[in-house]
Amino acid sequence: MNPSKNRRSFIKKATAMLGAFSANSVFNQVHAAEWQSLEQSFHLQSPSVMASNEDYWSVIRQGYTASSDPIIMLNNGGVSPSPIVVQQAVERFNLMTNQGPSYYMWRILDQGRENLRESLAKLGGCSPEEIAINRNATEALVTVIYGLDLNRGDEVIGSHQDYPNMMQAWKQREMREGIIYKQLSFEFPIENDEEIVAAYRNAITEKTKILHLTHVVNWTGQIMPVQKISRMAHERGIEVIIDGAHSYGLLEFNIPDLEGDYFGTSLHKYLSAPIGSGMLWIKKEKIAKVWPLICAGDPKSGDIRKFENLGTRSFPIEQGIGEALNFHNAIGTKRKEERIRYLKDYWATQAIEIPKVRLHTSLKKEFSCALACVSVEGVNPGDLHDKLMKMYKIQTSPISLGNLHCVRVSPHVYTKVSDLDKLVDGLEKIAKG
């Protein structure tokens, strides 16, 4: 057996008694008994039925400090608050670290990463040997964007609806190296997968090497048909990078089933991990060809860990990720997805009945989940955001992108239905002027 694998196996067993992956995890101490009892009452109900079960979700809500006071947080698509157990884990291990940083960081907490890698991979339906742990989706995706060898004149196709940091990274390569960065433009919502696939297909030329896709568009919540686009691209010998910042920890899927070659995500969105945590997935046979963003002793290694050579990092945050996984898995991905989609539909179906109010997101479940954008005729996004904040202390996200002018609303599992009633009431009052 490979000596390095032997060592990792030993470390994983030796650290199984530590932190988030032990019987003494914060989650087990705080929630396990109550939630097991709760699960016995509801385990026979389908996720779609459970979506509107307020008794169940009121218990989940108690696991968060986030509430309606002092603000109603409806911008979870930006950064989600962490559950109490996640906050406590970070605090616990930060205190431990500061008792003797060089010992507790490198000799104790650093050894817990293999268990974390395995748990993240299990949720993503992939191999742990394809998962690197980092700080956010930008770091994960820019690692790939800057790490792939491209020649002058090679084409990359993305869209104007991709995340700004990703667009800027490709534009920087275009400026420095002479690659060609092409961007499509979409008018969402689109309720026809083939229309989107065709747009990418028609943009491809013999020089196209990479498609950059966004799984869930952060501006409007549009769920993109990334699997269909990836299949089309691979038939033409083109690689695919997928931005999963708004899908991992929200939608039920296995990363390999998207059929991309590279996938990056932030864990501090719908997984509710500590702020400043992310993950990179690279198909095993592709790892060796990607240069690390920072450095590595063997930059052409096929070991995914070469992307984790960040120097000193926050090990307490990594333990917090583990507790976020415990919290998430106790709910279940599909149950969580259906609840958050239910909350989005709850306010959005009422809002579209209000005169002068327009929704910019599909209400069909295959095209959206948590995020939805709304506008009020005659009110610019900044003013609508400010009015909602002033009137009801509702925090949203103003969006101005091309012809899209709206505010983005994104609830989470701790969101109260009564808070969404306040949102609808606010939209109605603002629309009436």
Image: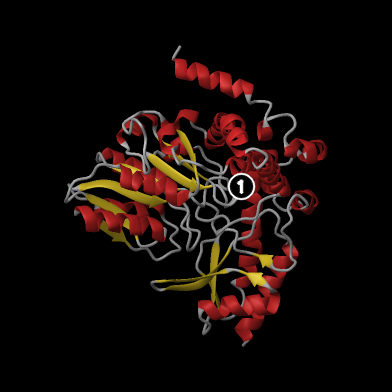
Q: Which residue is more in the foreground, 399 or 431? A: 399
115 w.r.t. 420: above or below: above
Task: Tell me the colour scheme of the image.
Answer: secondary structure
Relative side of 288 to 114, left or right: left
Q: Position of residue 392 (x, y in %)?
A: 70, 75
Residue 4 in view here: yes
Q: Which residue is more in the foreground, 44 or 306? A: 306
Q: Position of residue 6 (x, y in %)?
A: 50, 16
Relative side of 128 to 433, left or right: left
Q: Position of residue 128 (x, y in %)?
A: 50, 30
* Name of the residue lying farthest toward the top: 1
Residue 35 in view here: no
- Residue at (20% x, 49% y) in the render: 154
Quarter residue 319 falls in: top right
Relative side of 90 to 240, left or right: right
20 w.r.t. 153: above or below: above
* Rendered-image quadrant of the N terminus: top left
Q: Amino acid at mark 1?
A: Ala
Mark 1 lies on a secondary structure that is: loop
Mark 1 closeness class: few <14, some 14–19, many ≥20 residues within 10 Å: many
Q: Which residue is more in the foreground, 97 or 155? A: 97
- Residue at (35% x, 58% y) in the render: 167
Q: Which residue is mark 1?
A: 273
- Residue at (56% x, 44% y) in the render: 314
Q: Position of residue 279 (x, y in %)?
A: 49, 42
- How many numbered dots are placed on residues in this image? 1
- Residue at (37% x, 35% y) in the render: 296
* Rendered-image quadrant of the C terminus: bottom right
Quarter residue 9 falls in: top right
Quarter residue 249 falls in: top right
* Name of the residue lying farthest toward the bottom: 433
